[in-house]
Amino acid sequence: MKSALHADFSSATRAFVAIRKWFLRKSTAGTGARFYSIGHSEAYELGASKLQANTEAADVLGTPISTGRPLGSISTNGTTGRAILSFSATGTKATGRVFLEAINKAGVWSLTKLTLKVDGYDSVIDLIRQSKVEIKGPRWRVS
C-alpha cells in the first residue's frame, strides 16, 4: 500500500510533467511562428529583392540568386519598427551572407543598411549605394 506522502508526490510529479509538456508545446509553436514571421517579413523580402536586383551582386554570385532563412530580430510598435537580419545568398558562382538593417516609419519599411559579404573575399559590397528603397504594404518603391 502506498503512503499518503508518496501519493502527494506522484500527483505533484504528474502536474509538473503536464505543465512542462504544455509549456514545451507553446514554446515550440511560438518559435516556429517567429521563424515564419521573420522569413516572410516585409523587411526581409525588401532586402532579398534589392539583392536579387543588384547587378554587382549578380556578377559576383551568379544568377539566379537564392536566399536562405533569415536570422535576427524584428521589433514593431504600431506603425514603427526596426529589423536587424542576416541571411545567406547563393548563386551559381559563389555564396555569401547578407546583413540588413531596416526601419519602419508610418508603416513604410526603409533599408538603412544592406551589405553582402561574399565567402572567400575580404571586401563587403554595399547594396544600397545612396539609393533609397522602401516598401509599403504589398507594393515596392525603389528610388
Image (tube, grey):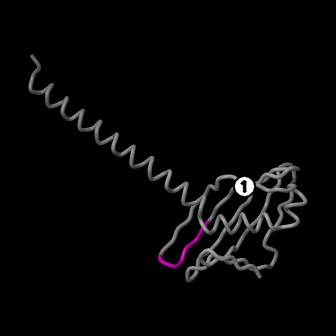
Is residue 75 left or right of 134 when viewed as pictured? left
Q: Which residues are magenta?
A: 78-83
- Residue drawn 68% across the image and 58% down it: 86
Depth check: give the residue in front, 71 or 35.
35
Residue 135 against residue 26 in the figure, above or below: below
Principal secondary structure, stretch drawn in magenta: strand
In the displayed orientation, state which residue is furthest to the right: 59
In the displayed orientation, state which residue is furthest to the front: 138
Classed neighbour count for the residue bearing mark 1: other residues with Cα under 10 Å, few (<14), some (14–19), many (≥20): many
In this rendering, the count of numbered labels is 1
Residue 93 % position (x, y): 88, 50
Q: Describe the element under mark 1 as helix, strand or loop.
A: strand
What amino acid does circle 1 point to? Thr
Which quadrant of the view contains residue 48?
A: bottom right
Which quadrant of the view contains residue 36?
A: bottom right
Residue 5 against residue 16 in the figure, above or below: above
- Residue drawn 62% across the image and 78% down it: 136
Depth check: give the residue in front, 53 or 19.
53
- Residue drawn 77% across the image and 82% down it: 143
Residue 73 % position (x, y): 57, 61
Residue 108 against residue 57 in the figure, above or below: below
Residue 79 % position (x, y): 51, 79
Residue 134 % position (x, y): 68, 78
Is residue 20 left or right of 42 when viewed as pictured? left
Q: Circle 1 sits on which residue?
A: 67
In the rendered view of the protein, which quadrant contains the N terminus? Answer: top left
- Residue drawn 33% across the image and 44% down it: 22
Is residue 101 left or right of 11 when viewed as pictured? right
In the displayed orientation, state which residue is furthest to the top: 1
Residue 21 against residue 111 in the figure, above or below: above
Within the magenta stretch, is there residue 114?
no
